[in-house]
Image: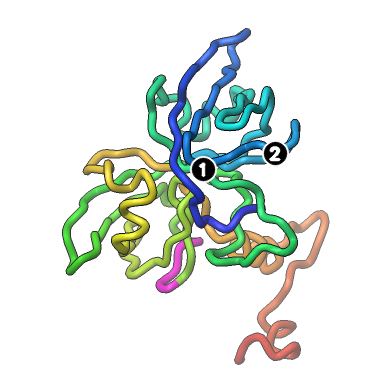
Amino acid sequence: MFTGIIAATGQVSRIQNIGGDWRVTIKSEVLDFSGVQTGDSIAVSGVCLTALAIEQHQFSADVSRETLDCTTLRNWREGELVNLELALQPQSRLGGHIVSGHVDGVGELLSRAPDGRSERLVLRVPPALARYIAHKGSVCLDGVSLTVNEVNGNEFGVNIIPHTFDKTTLHQYHSGRKVNVEVDVIARYLERLLTGKADTAQGLTLEQLARAGFANT
């Protein structure tokens, strides 16, 4: 699990095509991977990857066809700037929100404009993901935990403060940029509880939520 608080940026230093899958090598002069063990998880621009061949300032990871199909990794080139976050430890502060590193889909940046000292970004996501994005809710873009400012159909806006803008890859984004999107895991599980599945569960009803004090009827 992750928090969406980026520790540092790094670069894709090598991409190998091995039998249709990829092995990528990620390098960061800022982040120290000495404490990472083989098999540990590292979020790379929002995608949870398993660390292999670990050195002090770099590691490699295998990328499956599924990940290439469902994320922006398929567009990576050597030299690509990426966001990096090590897996959450039990004693760590949860500074962002709960992030799994399992990308739900790819969104597109529609516009970027100054807003005081911040930057305002407007993005569009596939309609199937839009229902999970709520005003003042959380969303993860390329591994960065952000608060949703407004929602209009399958478009939404976020505000990027100067620190986040400078310390992540967001400063290089322009209209048309594709981004990895992970919606709030709580929203996904709540929908599953509410809808259920006819052959396996009845689902959670609003009446049940009301009895438990979580909703008004």
Picture coordinates of residue 137, whole percent (x, y): 47, 70
Outermost residue toward the right?
200
Q: Is residue 157 visible?
A: no
Distance CA(mark 1)–CA(mark 2): 13 Å
Picture coordinates of residue 34, whole percent (x, y): 66, 37
Identified by mark 1, the residue type is: Leu
Taking 167 as reference, is 19 left or right?
A: right
Q: Nearer the viewer, residue 105 or 36?
A: 36
Residue 204 vertical position relative to residue 170 in the rendered view, above or below: below
Magenta span of residues: 132-136
- The residue beneath circle 2 is 36
Of the numbered discs in the image, which one, if any, rests on residue 84? Answer: 1
Residue 139 vertical position relative to residue 24 in the rendered view, above or below: below
| Residue under the point 58% across and 58% down | 3
Q: Is residue 34 visible?
A: yes
Taking 195 as reference, is 175 left or right?
A: left
Picture mark count = 2
Queried whether the magenta region covers residue 56, the answer comes back as no
| Residue under the point 61% across and 53% down | 2
Q: Nearer the viewer, residue 202 or 99?
A: 99
Picture coordinates of residue 92, whole percent (x, y): 66, 63
Secondary structure at badge 1 equals strand
Secondary structure at badge 2 equals loop
Which secondary structure dominates the residues rendered in magenta? loop
| Residue under the point 58% across and 11% down | 20
Q: Label 1 neighbourhood size at 10 Å, few (<14), some (14-19), many (20+)?
A: many
Identified by mark 2, the residue type is: Val
Q: Nearer the viewer, residue 143 or 55?
A: 55
| Residue under the point 22% across and 43% down | 175
Q: Label 2 neighbourhood size at 10 Å, few (<14), some (14-19), many (20+)?
A: some
In which image quadrant can residue 32 be found? top right
Residue 202 vertical position relative to residue 60 in the rendered view, above or below: below
